[in-house]
Amino acid sequence: MNTKANVKRREVMKNKVTLTCLNPYGEKSKSPKAMGLFAPRVKDLKGKRIALVWCEKLGGENYFDDLQKLLEKKLPDTKLLRMNWVDGIEKRLLEETDTFVYGVGDSGIGAWESTSRTISIEKMGKPGIVVYASHLVPNAKASAEAQGMPTLRMVTLPTIEYYPNRVSSERLQSVAEKTVDQIIDFLTRPLTSEEMNPVDKPREKKFKLVEITALNYEDAYEKFNQLYLDNHWGDGLPLVPPTPEAVKLMLSGTKRSSDEILGAFASPDGLSETGVATIEKIAINAVMAGAKPEYFPVIIAAIESLVDKKFSPHAFTSEGSFTFLIIVSGPIGKKIKMHSGTGLLGHGFRANNTIGRAVRLCLSNIGYLWPGEHDLALIGRPSSHTFYVLAENEDLSPWLPSHVTLGYKPEDSCVTVATVMGQRIYGGGTVLPCSEDEVLNEIIKDVANDRRIFQFDPRKGNRAHPLQHIIILHPEIANAMKARGFTCQSFRDYIIETTSVPYEKLSENEIEGIKYRIADKSNIFFGSGLIPAERLPIFERALQPGGKVPVVISLEDIFIAVSGEIPGYTFGYSYLRGALLTKLIRSNKEKRH
């Protein structure tokens, strides 16, 4: 027996380091009790009425063209009905059909929404199936569980074949041929006992503490980062270990109770919920991001915006490379040393960068948005580790800060969170001499492009979605506008007035589109296309000689802030309405609940 070796081994064990951390993963929202399929399948399709319901995702109509031809050939006595998902379709499906096929879900939100809509009809007693691309199985399965019908029958189209060929029905023919027999089978095969009596999925147990043991701290730190990344708790960059002591220190940045629930992140279709956001889980993720306790109230307010039911969840999972913009207004920006000068959206500024990173980690760990699973942004999201975070430059701004123009007190601090896409630069910065007139004209031209929302398709209605615009003026331009007599509100109103279209210049198609939008009561895209009730009279009065129709649906759809330096760039973003929200940052002097 080698006594010296055993002694050495015991010494090594004795000197090992254990790193104890808290689990950043949030609790899932409770799903409804699982219910089975109960509507009997049709025994056969002879003489039956089958609805092919198109979700209006382009390319899907071509698949249904091919599917219709194949079904007509295989089942000549069957009546096939083509429908689009519009208001009132539920009544048609219940009264005019025997069974239905819904599709094609071709995106994260598309698969989720297609599944939930199919389930909504199943729950009314009409049997059907959903069709979507094969890589979207996790989204569709999660949607079915969230709606309480996990055994919904689903048909997947081979992703590698569907996407390149969806440009025409001719090219999609082989895809339809490969799936038509399965569709017939799923529409007619009697329900199994398992389909009618699904077992509730047990809630996954989450360990509060995670322990990492290693020979030294450096090794423990490396193991910690790898473990968290392997579990999809990280973001690909080194994390700060969320030890109980570090999390307790983060929680000192607020007086709110650690177990307070702010709300739950909405599912991509907005019909259910994913993860529950508590103060403690937000604090754990804020520690991992490298934030300081004094930043914590800003992070909390940003998450409050994202879990608010008024905030559109579309960008949580969309394939489009949309991202988030976080704007801080009020005294707290200067207090925590947020950056608002040259390089305001860049790296090197701890407050800006770690606030955004904390929000990113919360979306991943509490909202369950991991790349390639539920977050399906095809090329990722710009500035995806930290998003875009800036503070208003109140020292160089000639106007009241944005939160005051929104009705908050000057001593208040607020955070505005918005989904954004397609950054535009207005003016030349330091490269090209550029007058304030040129900057203003570029802003007007950009917003005026929203005129496309008037265009009308007799089969599909209004296809273009109204937008919200965020315009960040650099101080040089803001001061020039102030010299012309503009306030922040009057500058906004000038943009809206200047981009409005005279009635006499509208085409007949545009007039029809405006009338359609005025009458529209649907909730397509979370109601983003609806004109607010208080604005309807403005649009109605504008549809007559001498009237002017706004391309900006609501006053709240233009958000203006001043940030940057002299020289600088004035820049802007836009996105669908319903994804911009301002929240008051609660003082850390407030008492705990």
Image (cartoon, rainbow, N blue to C red):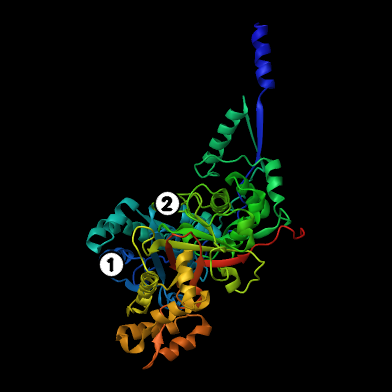
Callout 2 secondary element: loop
Q: Which amino acid type is marked by label 1? A: Asp
Instruction: Judge left or right: residue 229 versus residue 255.
Output: left
- Where 170 sits versus 241, above or below? below
Q: Position of residue 117 (x, y in %)?
A: 47, 67
Q: Are marks 2 and 1 in contact (CB under 8 Å)?
A: no
Q: Amino acid at mark 2?
A: Gly
| Residue located beneath label 1 in the image | 65
Residue 514: x and y, percent? Answer: 39, 83
User: Viewed as shown, does residue 255 lie left or right of 231?
Assistant: right
Q: Quadrant of residue 519?
A: bottom left
Q: Which one is nearer the viewer's eye here, 407 or 140?
A: 407
Residue placed farthest to the top in the image?
1
Q: Nearer the viewer, mark 2 or mark 1?
A: 2
In the rendered image, the vertical position of residue 143 relative to residue 206, given as above or below: below
Residue 126 picture location, percent across and down = 47, 70
Image location of residue 475, percent across then percent down: 49, 65
List the single residue furthest toward the bottom. Answer: 545
User: To which residue does mark 2 refer?
Assistant: 380
